[in-house]
Amino acid sequence: MSSQDKAAAQENTGKTADKVFKVIAYAAGILILVALAAVFLFLLFRAWPLIGGDQSANAATVESFTGGKAHNFWQYVGPLVFGTVLVAALALIIAFFIAVGIALFISHYAPKQLAVVLSSVVDLLAAIPSVIYGLWGGLILVPAIGPFWNWVATYLGWIPIFKGPAASPARTVATVAVVLAVMILPIITSVSRDIFQQAPRLQQEAALGLGATKWEMIKLAVIPFGKSGVISASMLGLGRALGETMAVLMILSPGLTYSVRLLQASQSQTIAANIAAQYPEANDLGVSTLIGTGLVLFIITFLVNFIARKITEKASV
């Protein structure tokens, strides 16, 4: 076979491989959309008795779940949505700046051997099941953090969110937010660290060569480069906090109010924890009601990720 024939054969093989890879990539992308649509349709189908069924029976089911505090689905799910968003937002606020600081320390300040050890620890923490965090929060953190919340209520109680008296034991939104912050901290840290380590070395050296300090170099060359990635990491952590079940169920004293008093018990509950708590004793219509709240959580999570994608696109421009 001549060299021209060999080149033509290699070119044909390459084109075939490109076509195969293109088909596989398209199939993978379509599979994600199919899975997403399947989950949505499943939730909608199972929640349909709540939407199109006997509304008086639905009202009776809601009243049985809430002890007569709510009389229709929206009165029931509204405080749950509020509690879910409140707990997740607080966890993200607590975890975000700590996670970015740890990521910057690992990527730019820590000695190489220490950075390797810290990276391994962070990755290990990200893999710990949520039930372990729940056990730690319920058995260790709740008794230990009580005196601190009492101090906060005493000296910062003039701020509405810290108004006392602080609950004892501290099975409150504030304690759950701390536990969820610890849970999502490794996720945000791990992704942010990888992004910061990929910052262009040439730009960093140029900033240092122009007389910038290390912090100025990070502020000018590293953080702008990693901004979109850090936002994506934060939304990934927020998504886990929104859907967390076991840790919340094991720690939080549930309530059904629109309250921002973080240090008092029996104020709020999250959708996922409520489903886990109510499901074992629910009848068929009760299951449909709970799945309806799950559908609301699915939509909230989708909207959060959609908004995050838009923010990331703007940040990367």
Image: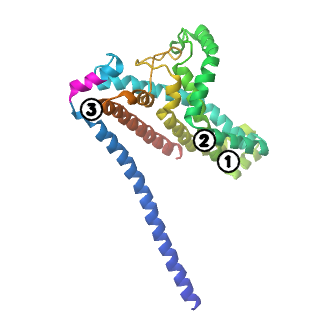
Q: Residues within 10 Å of mark 2 (few under 14, many from 20)?
A: few
Q: Could you tell me which residue is drawn at 57 percent across and 37 percent down? A: 129
Residue 197, disc: 1
Who comes first in sequence, dot 3 or dot 1?
Answer: 3
Name the secondary structure under disc 2: loop
Tell me the magenta residue range: 54-61
Which residue is denoted by mark 2 in the rendering? 127
Q: Residues within 10 Å of mark 1 (few under 14, many from 20)?
A: some
Along the viewing direction, whichever of 105 and 314 lies nearer the viewer: 105
Nearer to us of marks 2 and 1 is 2
Along the viewing direction, whichever of 112 and 75 lies nearer the viewer: 75
In the rendered structure, the answer to whether residue 280 lies left or right of residue 10 reads left
Q: Quadrant of residue 53?
A: top left
Who comes first in sequence, dot 2 or dot 3?
Answer: 3
Which residue is denoted by mark 3 in the rendering? 50
Percent position of residue 311, x then y: 48, 40
- The answer, for residue 212, to whether it is visible in the render is no
Circles 2 and 1: CB distance less than 8 Å? no
